[in-house]
Image: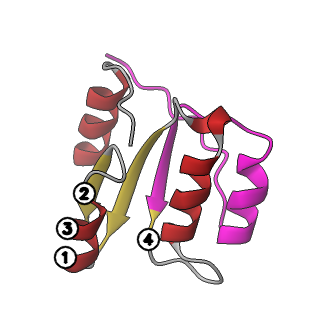
Amino acid sequence: MVVNLHKPYAVTSNIALKRLATVVPNLIVLDIHLPYLSGRDILEAIHANPDLEKTFVIVVTADLFEAEDLQGKADQVLMKPISFQRLHQVIEQLLTRPKAKH
């Protein structure tokens, strides 16, 4: 499978929330530790938006306790550091299966 990564990315959490109000991505890679607003808050906003219910969410963190607590709240939780190869593998797996509800 070839994964075409189009990256309309956001550099701050505020920009991310504004983009998610107008864009419905297939997949979001979300860091939990962001400036201004936590990735947890963005994750809650994603879950609260019915337009994003089919959007896959990969959460990344360097915090083991955060990773354990986020299990089941995102489609995949990855610990940093993450290689591009591992991220690509996870994306391929997610995009070839139906979206689970959280």
**Do we see residue 80 in this rendering?**
no
For the point 58% across and 63% down, the residue is: 42
- Residue 3 image offset from top left, x and y in percent: 41, 25
| Figure quadrant of the N terminus | top left
Residue 32 — which label? 4
Q: What residue is pinned by disc 1?
A: 64
Q: What residue is pinned by disc 2?
A: 71
Q: Mark 4 near mark 2, Cβ–Cβ under 8 Å?
A: no
Q: Which numbered disc, 4 or 2, marks the residue that appears first in the sequence? A: 4
Crowding around mark 2 (Cα neighbors within 10 Å: few <14, some 14 to 19, many 20+) is few
Q: Mark 3 near mark 2, Cβ–Cβ under 8 Å?
A: yes
Crowding around mark 1 (Cα neighbors within 10 Å: few <14, some 14 to 19, many 20+) is few
Crowding around mark 4 (Cα neighbors within 10 Å: few <14, some 14 to 19, many 20+) is many
Q: Nearer the viewer, mark 2 or mark 1?
A: 2
Task: Please tell me whether mark 3 sits on a helix, a strand or a loop.
Answer: helix
Magenta-highlighted residues: 1-30
Task: Please tell me whether mark 2 sits on a helix, a strand or a loop.
Answer: loop
